[in-house]
Amino acid sequence: AGGVLAVTHAVCMGQVANAFAVVRPPGHHACAGCGCVQGFCVFNNIAVAAANARRSEWYESGVPPAGVPRRILIIDFDVHHGDGIQQIFYRDPGICYISIHRGARDAEGLETEEAGGRGKGFFPGTGLAAEVGDGPGLGFNINIPFENTGMGDAEYKLAFETVVMPIARQFAPDLVFVAAGFDAAARDKKSQADFGLSAQCYGWMTRQIMTLAGGRVVMALEGGYDIPEICAGGVECLRALQEQKPQPDESGL
């Protein structure tokens, strides 16, 4: 979590425009108070950074040029639902969490035994569309579960254009975090999601996100089981952060 904290502080203080924290282990499955490691996650890197970014006393060296961020958006495009991030901020209206992921239905098309359960379905068995936040956080938790396999660039772009970005612009965040998992990539077979995102689509999503919060974006590496796919997707995200043109897609995908 220290790496994500460091780059978040640098972005908020205006020392860098944006950042990508290449960290391990990932964090978006780590919950508050669960007392266990799940989905290879120990500390919820983004949650720790987001919670600290809103604390005025965290900025010992001065006041952030754009002010202390009060409205924070977290976009999660890891193929697995970020149940930890959802659980931590489920009642918090200052954090808007949007996750686009493989849905929690099992092979027979049945949902988990209960909302938020882990009994069956695609890991972690959460992330239903009906999970929309609670109390003061009602409406600030948005899940976009794809219940079918074979989802690719076209489906993700449509979801971004019609759901993710309109909500993000209306929320008007001061700071954006991206839970950047690359296990929806076309050649990542170990995730067993059977999705087909190209590296260029990861870059395209990042370019859309860069239009928010004055470009104050912090990306943190989450899942991914195929190193070449992580590298390819990560490079395209970095090119987007640096406002470089995308590499041509030579894969034919």
Image (cartoon, rainbow, N blue to C red):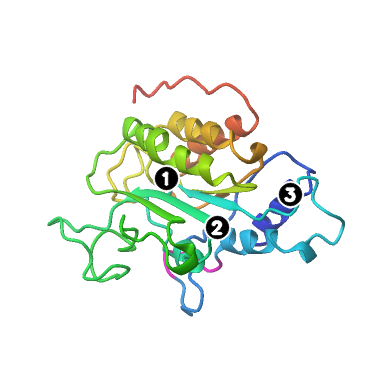
Question: In percent of the image, x 46 and y 72: which residue is there?
Answer: 37
Give the left or right position of residue 233, taking residue 195 as reference: right
The image quadrant of residue 156 is top left
Magenta span has 124? Answer: no
Mark 3 near mark 2, Cβ–Cβ under 8 Å? no
Q: Nearer the viewer, mark 3 or mark 2?
A: 2
Q: Position of residue 38 (x, y in %)?
A: 43, 69
Per the rendered image, the range of residues in magenta is 38-43
The image quadrant of residue 182 is top left
Which residue in the structure is indicated by mark 2?
95
Tag 3 secondary structure: helix
| Disc 1: CA contacts within 10 A as few (<14), some (14-19) or many (>=20) | some
Q: Position of residue 135 (x, y in %)?
A: 45, 69
Q: Nearer the viewer, mark 2 or mark 1?
A: 2
How far apart marks 1 and 3 lie (CA) works out to 32 Å
Which residue in the structure is indicated by mark 3?
12
**Residue at the outermost left position:** 108
Q: Nearer the viewer, mark 1 or mark 3?
A: 3
Tell me which secondary structure the magenta stretch mostly adopts.
loop
| Disc 2: CA contacts within 10 A as few (<14), some (14-19) or many (>=20) | many
Q: Position of residue 127 (x, y in %)?
A: 34, 58
Which residue in the structure is indicated by mark 1?
226
